[in-house]
Image (tube, rainbow, N blue to C red):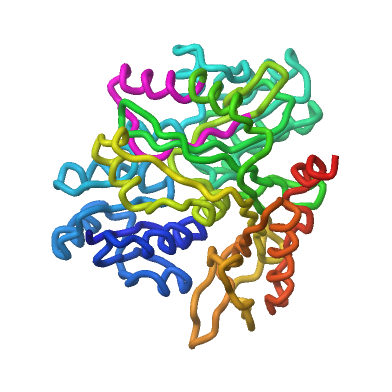
Amino acid sequence: MRVLLIGSGGREHALAWKLAQSPRLTALYAAPGNPGIAEEATLVDLDTENNDAVLAFCVRESIDFVVVGPEAPLVAGLADTLRDGGIVVFGPSAAAAQLEGSKGFTKDICAKYDIPTGAYQRFTTAEPAKAYIREQGAPIVIKADGLAAGKGVTVAMTLDEALEAVDSCFSGTFGAAGAEVVVEAYLDGEEASFFCLCDGTSALALASAQDHKRVGDGDTGPNTGGMGAYSPAPVMTADMIDRTMREIIEPTIAGMADSGHPFTGVLFAGLMITAKGPELIEYNVRFGDPECQVLMMRLKSDLLPLLYAAATGTLASVTAEWRNEVALTVVMASKGYPGAYEKNTPIAKLPHEDAATKVFHAGTALKDGQLVATGGRVLNVTAMGKTVCAAKDTAYAALDRVVWDNGFCRRDIGWQAIEREKA
């Protein structure tokens, strides 16, 4: 099978690394890719924002299957263009991708199909939103409706913080994504990420993970795209997974099909495990980043036929097998992230990799033969271990061998699970 992978981050490096191991693969291309992905795939100079250009490449190179990594091309209809052109593609239509592209759309689906989530209201101007916030009180959650690269959510612990977040959205901080704001109830509990493949009518549960969104140790500081993750998440017990499938995933798939927008691809449910059980925080329509990195480390099965089954309506014919060990990844970011940071800082050395450790490139490039950091989140140092504590120790031992003066990381990835292990 000749495959094209769309994307350039740590998630896509993990997908490329796993796809490259498939005996069914004959050629793997990636656009635009990064230096890590270049070790697994042939990089293609392709404008991935130009749907027709991507289709033309697929036709020219006899591509059998396209795997779309990030959310933006899906929301922009890349999967629709490819399907209309006769190309099999892993990823939802633009209409189905609204589950991530519009927070309000997802909340409305939850309301219509009785999917457990926090109470909410949608607003297109600031004053009614502020009046609702004053009425509800803090803590409360303010979300830019559209895609904001993981930065459009404020978990406001005070009224002032909530009101400021509303002003920030409507003043254009998040561009068009903030033209509408969703204000929703604060959910108290433990967060978890849950993933399943969908083929439009059925779902295959994959695995759980736990992300660490805030930039600082002890879950302090502003939200980021994710500073580290581990899998599996202990809070996602067999019973909790069963409830999540029955109460959240299956009604969503049925609801999307009922609304005329059947969902195919990977459904990533951001959950809060509350005293009542699993409640939906939000949906994403692609693998998480950095959760994908830990999922791919743990996946024993061949990834390619799993994704192809989701894309072709044949999920019932496949199963996914997982390693029992824990996988944990630590994000190395550029100093200043998630605010302003210096670009093109040199990364002098990466650690040696072995069966238990892997460094996934997220925001890197080669400039005159030198590996440099070009993004906010730059490297994902990932390790396996029998316990969360063991995986953490291995990951940080590898991370400490990275030579990059402008990098920083959290030192407490996995802390909740480690406290459980010690209890």
In the image: residue 372, left or right of residue 30:
right
In the image: residue 303, left or right of residue 392:
left
Residue 407 vertical placement versus 142 (above, below): below
Residue 20 picture quarter = bottom left
Residue 130 picture quarter = top right
Residue 123 vertical placement versus 34 (above, below): above
Q: Give percent across and percent down for residue 67.
A: 33, 52
Instruction: Give the residue at x 61% y 43%.
Output: 232
Picture quarter with the C terminus: top right
Q: Give percent across and percent down for residue 390.
A: 73, 58
Picture quarter with the N terminus: bottom left
For the residue pair 364 and 270, the one nearer the viewer reads as 270
Instruction: Give the residue at x 49% y 19%.
Output: 246
Instruction: Give the residue at x 42% y 43%.
Output: 320
For the residue pair 381 and 135, the one nearer the viewer reads as 381
Q: Give percent across and percent down for residue 61.
A: 17, 65
Is residue 140 something one can see in this rendering? Answer: yes
Q: Give percent across and percent down for residue 38.
A: 41, 73
Name the outermost residue toward the right.
423
Is residue 219 something one can see in this rendering? Answer: no
For the residue pair 160 and 126, the one nearer the viewer reads as 160
The question of residue 246 being in magenta is answered with no
Q: Which residues are magenta?
A: 248-271
